[in-house]
Image (cartoon, rainbow, N blue to C red):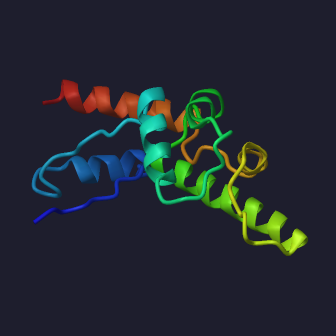
Amino acid sequence: MLLGLRLSHIRLSQSSGRLLASKGRFGSLVYVPLPNADERVSILKSIAKKRPIHPSVDLDAIANKYCQGFSGADLANLMDKAINEATKEKFVDMDLSDCTIKMTHFKQALSLVTPSVSKKQIKHYEKLRKKLQSST
């Protein structure tokens, strides 16, 4: 039996971090960094598998050039926004027969999606991870 888990970031304040780090609360804390460039490409391609992506779309370029700091959830949100943009375009034309997601749709979606984890939060989580590693 496979158990699928969807991990996303947790915003911890100093006090809640101490609470969660207390023995017996959750067993152990696990730091899950944001995906690197290769992982973003894999995630985006996985999300795109059952989507009507136009052949001209370069998912590698999107993940590498535009999605630094994006979590897996951010990439899923980007895909949803791109689908919405493609659908809106086709409703204007009233021709849903060829509703594929093109590069222009991703560019429009990228203007609507920002990383859910700020650089400041990433620094905080890195400090917390180092602090927790040094205390074990």
Provide residue 107's location: percent of width, then percent of height: 76, 43
Instruction: Give the quadrant of residue 38.
Output: top left
Rendered view: 91 above or below 30: below
Query: Can you see residue 73?
Result: no
Q: Is residue 71 left or right of residue 20?
A: right
Q: Is residue 116 left or right of residue 129?
A: right
Give me the residue at 71% from left, 47% from top: 106
- Horizontally, is 121 left or right of 12 in the view? right
Above/below status of 126 relative to 28: above
- Residue 126 in the figure: left or right of residue 91: left
Q: How many marks?
A: 0
**Residue under the image location 69 percent in, 55 percent down:** 82
In percent of width and height, residue 128 lies at 35, 34
Of 47 and 134, the residue lying toward us: 47
Tell me: residue 36, above or below residue 56. above
Quadrant location, the C terminus? top left
Closer-to-camera residue (130/13):
130
Extreme residue toward the right, this view: 92
Residue 49 at x, y = what percent?
A: 46, 53
Quarter of the figure with the N terminus: bottom left
